[in-house]
Amino acid sequence: MLDLLVRLYELPANAKSAREGFTVRRAFAAEKEMVRVFAAQHFTAGWASECELAFARMPVACFIAVKHDTIAGFACYDVAARGFFGPIGVAEKQRNNGLGSALLVAALRDMSAQGYAYAIIGRVPDAEFYRRNLSVIEIPDSEPGFYRGLLKSQ
């Protein structure tokens, strides 16, 4: 896994549009538990913990994709460390429709609005998704980098 660097002052003008009927927006504080449960059910306990921490930020540093009051995906930032993007996840049934791209760009634009010039995308197992959506730079010798000593799930 590697870390990527993104120039937030060179984000794409428009994210690939999400499937019709979905809304990508900042999560409300009252949705914290729903987002945490979604992340735990569809991804990992670690990601659920990071989602929960995103709700401690002001403004909330978690964006969600919703349709008919149902969560389809999320993207967070400033949880592993300041200036780090992620985690991001879209329910398997909702993938390949632009939701991931829309969540990615919404969260990165918010980081830019918060005053960040760059973002680090950490522990990327496959950079293809990010390369399709952004101009990214691989950070040399970034494995394990910041995540050295991270506990693994049993």
Image: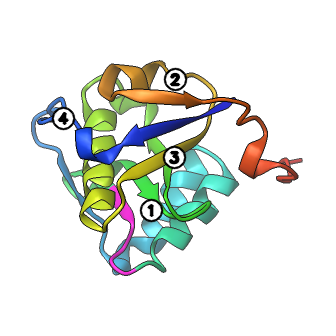
Tell me the quarter of the picture where residue 144 sits: top right
Q: Amino acid at mark 2?
A: Ala
Circle 2 residue: 127
Give the class, few, some or many, for how many residues have Cα within 10 Å of label 1's Cα (few <14, many ≥20).
Answer: many
Q: Alpha carbon of mark 4 to alpha carbon of mark 3: how far?
A: 19 Å
Q: Amino acid at mark 1?
A: Val
Q: Which mark is residue 15?
A: 4
Q: Alpha carbon of mark 2 to alpha carbon of mark 1: how far?
A: 25 Å
Q: Which mark is residue 82?
A: none
For discs 4 and 1, the disc positioned in front in the rendered view:
4
Give yes or no for residue 62 being in the magenta stretch: yes
Give the class, few, some or many, for how many residues have Cα within 10 Å of label 4's Cα (few <14, many ≥20).
Answer: some
- Tell me which segment is drawn in magenta: 58-63
Total marks in image:
4
Q: Secondary structure at mark 4?
A: loop
Q: Secondary structure at mark 1?
A: helix
Give residue 110's position: percent from left, percent from top: 27, 60
Circle 3 residue: 120
- Please tell me which residue is depicted at 33% across the width and 29% down the height of the picture: 134
Mark 4 or mark 1: name the one nearer the start of the chain: 4
Q: Alpha carbon of mark 3 to alpha carbon of mark 2: how far?
A: 13 Å
The chief SS type of the magenta part is loop
